[in-house]
Amino acid sequence: MHSLTAENLTELKLKANDVRQGIIRSLLAAGSGHSAGPLDMSDVFTALYGHLMRHDPSNPEWPDRDRLLLSCGHIAPVRYSAMANFGYFPVEELLTLRKFGSRLQGHPERVTLPSVETTSGPLGEGLAQGVGMALGAKMDGKDFHTWVVTSDAEHQCGLHWEAVLTGAKFKLDNLTAIVDRNFIQIDGSTEDVMPLEPFAQKYRAFNWEVFECDGNDIAEFIATAERARSYKGKPHVIIANTIPGKGVSYMEGDYLWHGKPPNAAQADEALRELAADRERIAAHE
Amino acid sequence: MSSGTPVLDAAAQRMQLADYRAADLKLVPTRNGFGEGLIEAGSRSREVLGICADLAESTRFEGFKKAHPAQYIEIGVAEQMLVAMAGGLAAVGKIPWIASYAMFNPGRSWEQVRTIMALNETNVKIAGAHAGVSVGPDGATHQAIEDIAIMRVIPHMTVVVPCDSVQTKKATLALSEMWGPVYLRFGREKSAVITTGETPFEIGKAQIFREGGDVAIVACGILVYNALIAADRLSAQHGIECRVVNNHTVKPMDEAAIVDAARGCGTVVTVEEHQRQAGMGSRVAEILAQRHPVPIEFIGVDDRFGQSGDPFELVEYYGMGADSIVEAARRAHERKK
């Protein structure tokens, strides 16, 4: 993997901005869906597709590609927008999100869109499948890496912890979980609904190597993920601290934006804001 | 052959059945057939894996573990994990067999089965052990009698309930080599071995084990033996000749064989070690209601839970013994008139 230059970083920031604009446009067209999570994970997905992962959009079935699983399938708009912006399919297709006949189902389905790697939406199931993929890679001597993006609230699911136990048993150092630690879920704050803290200590107690970073700082996330990926002997988790709704000021930090899309006026405002951000990023360069 | 015992009829001879009336009939648990089949499947393909949730001995994984240690994975008491992890392994080319008691997998793991195995179309194979009330002393918590219902309703799923240990071995091999999500159901207790190595087996193809034109008995699992015994009694004591169909593939069901049985006999008795609702017999009824309506009687558990007891005492108590099948066939025969 090449090292990150200042020029690359600006390109990635611009891409993350494109990804956010794609999210807003697709959610507006769909008329339903989740806003806060996709926006706050735009920097992470941009870093994964734009720098960290071994992948080839023109050959999505490449057997040696890194595997990226989105466990919390409800933030699919960020994955779709990142995939479109990195060349997996035309950006215009984002406007078919959640519509009849679309490959962009409300929650991702592998059968209709194979490059999403698995079907997800029911929470707490992605890491378990990632454990299977990473173990399969070890059994066959393959060197691809498996990345699993999870929400914080799905750590309330028992199956997720079965997967954490199993990953540790098999010392899957070719597996990295990324937690979107935005502290929100449908019914409110994660710490009110069902407290998750002390979060990092839980993973340490399960014998995982824990990394923590600002999930909305692309450079910091990339540096952290590179350290995690090269850590040997244990599976790793990156607790990516994010601001829900990041990039759209009126959504930031408000759990009520967890599960709803913007209306036309709100989308307009969001896109104006993002366009201004884009100018600033480009000008800064 | 003792005097007075009829020789196997033409259908049974065609199917090369064992002499199921013999006093020294072999009794072997169907789960043994799974264990033997899996060892052979693992030899045929290195991609075949056995994934165990702390039940290696009772699901008959032990032999596979010894024969193919590199293909064996133990994950502890975590049935949802069984399915989800197997989905990941299948996604990178493995052919995972996951085994637990049917009550826990697919009982506990049903949503993972639906999403990760079926909607996601992965090549994961479930072995559901200890199905039916014939689990015996463990009691109702461990007696899966709803599993056929919850599996046959899932699109893309193949559901197989073999009639004895020999057929379970053949089914394990055939399902290992078939691409797609499957559910293989078998039991704990020793049960009659009525087929032989020479008996054919094909997924999706029901088998006629006995000829007769008065009543069709359509059975699956270890109760196929009870159906054959009941057919003998019906012939000897009531002059009713039964066609006995081993309907081992519940999904996709052999519709032609079911319709042919209804046409040929004019009435049907279904027999399964499962709730009467939504199981194999209900599928038979769905097919016949649409294609060839005839009177149907259902043998199975009548909307109750099981309990502790001697395995075959429970089979009798819940109305699945040969005598209950005789009575159901007589009712069915009467309803034709």
Image: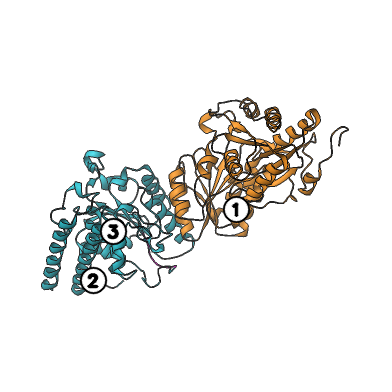
Chain colours: A cyan, B orange
User: How many residues crowd around disc 3 within 10 Å: few (fewer than 14), some, or many (20 or more)?
Assistant: many
Using residue B186 as the reference point, say whether residue B235 is left or right of it: right
Q: Position of residue A200 (x, y in %)?
A: 26, 48
The segment highlighted magenta reads: A63-68
Between B265 and B235, the one lying in front of the other is B265
Q: The disc labelled 2 sits on which kind of residue? A: Leu
Is residue A108 in view? Answer: yes
Q: Nearer the viewer, residue A136 or B223?
A: B223
Q: Chain of mark 1?
A: B
Callout 1 secondary element = helix
Secondary structure beneath disc 2?
loop
Say what secondary structure mark 3 lies in: helix
The answer to whether residue B20 is left or right of residue A84 is right
- The answer to whether marks 3 and 1 sit on the same chain is no
Q: Amino acid at mark 3?
A: Pro
Mark 2 or mark 3, earlier in chain = 2
Badge 1 amino acid: Leu
Q: Residue A269 shows which numbered tag?
A: none
Look at the numbered discs 3 and 1 and tell me whether their residues touch, using CB distance below 8 Å. no
Residue B175: image tag: 1
Mark 3 lies on residue = A77
The spot of residue A240 in percent (x, y) is 24, 55
Total labels: the figure holds 3
Pointer 2 chain: A
- Residue A198 sits inside the magenta stretch: no
**Is-magenta flag for residue A67?**
yes
* Mark 2, residue position: A4
Q: Is residue B131 left or right of residue A90?
A: right
**Residue A146 locus on image (x, y percent):** 38, 60
- Predominant SS of the magenta segment: loop
Image location (x, y in percent) of residue B158: 56, 50
Q: Quadrant of the C terminus of chain B?
A: top right
